[in-house]
Image: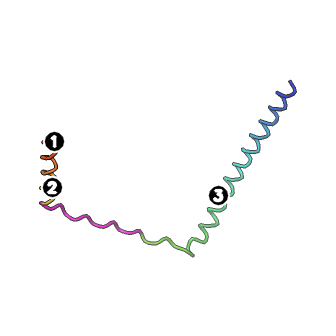
């Protein structure tokens, strides 16, 4: 019975340490976020790049699609 009680004590101690670590981690992450946001002007984000415009579909594309369908239907 002593081993069982010792195991429970170790389990609760371990769970408590993990819980405490997670709470500390949350506060550190919030503090780091506040610290970084104060100095955000030092390295501003670059402007987002615009995606390249797709060229309009030509009649060659339609012919290639029709050819692919014909080949698939035949085979």
Q: Residue at x 18, y 60 (%)?
A: 57
Q: Nearer the viewer, residue 65 or 35?
A: 65
The Cα–Cα distance between marks 2 and 3, rounded to whole angstroms, is 56 Å
- The residue that disc 2 covers is 64
Q: Nearer the viewer, residue 30 or 16?
A: 16
- Vertically, is 57 above or below 11? below
Mark 2 crowdedness (10 Å alpha carbons): few <14, some 14-19, many ≥20 = few
Q: State which quadrant residue 37 falls in.
A: bottom right
- Vertically, is 41 above or below 29? below
The Cα–Cα distance between marks 3 and 1, rounded to whole angstroms, is 62 Å
Q: Residue 60 at x, y = what percent?
A: 13, 60
Q: State which quadrant residue 14 falls in.
A: top right
Query: Quick one: SS at disc 1?
Result: loop
Query: Quick one: SS at disc 2?
Result: helix
Closer to the camera: disc 2 or disc 3? Answer: 2
Q: Is residue 18 magenta?
A: no
Q: Residue 24 at x, y = what percent?
A: 72, 52
- The residue that disc 3 covers is 30
- Secondary structure mostly seen in the magenta stretch: loop
Sequence-wise, the earlier of marks 3 and 1 is: 3
- The residue that disc 1 covers is 75
Instruction: Answer left or right for 20 relative to 68.
Output: right
């Amino acid at each position: 019975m002593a081993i069982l009680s010792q195991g429970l004590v170790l389990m609760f101690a371990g769970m408590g340490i993990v819980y405490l670590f997670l709470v500390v981690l949350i506060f550190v992450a919030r503090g780091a976020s506040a610290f970084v946001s104060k100095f955000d002007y030092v390295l501003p984000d670059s402007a987002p790049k615009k995606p390249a415009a797709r060229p309009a579909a030509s009649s060659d594309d339609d012919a290639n699609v029709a050819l692919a369908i014909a080949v698939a239907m035949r085979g």
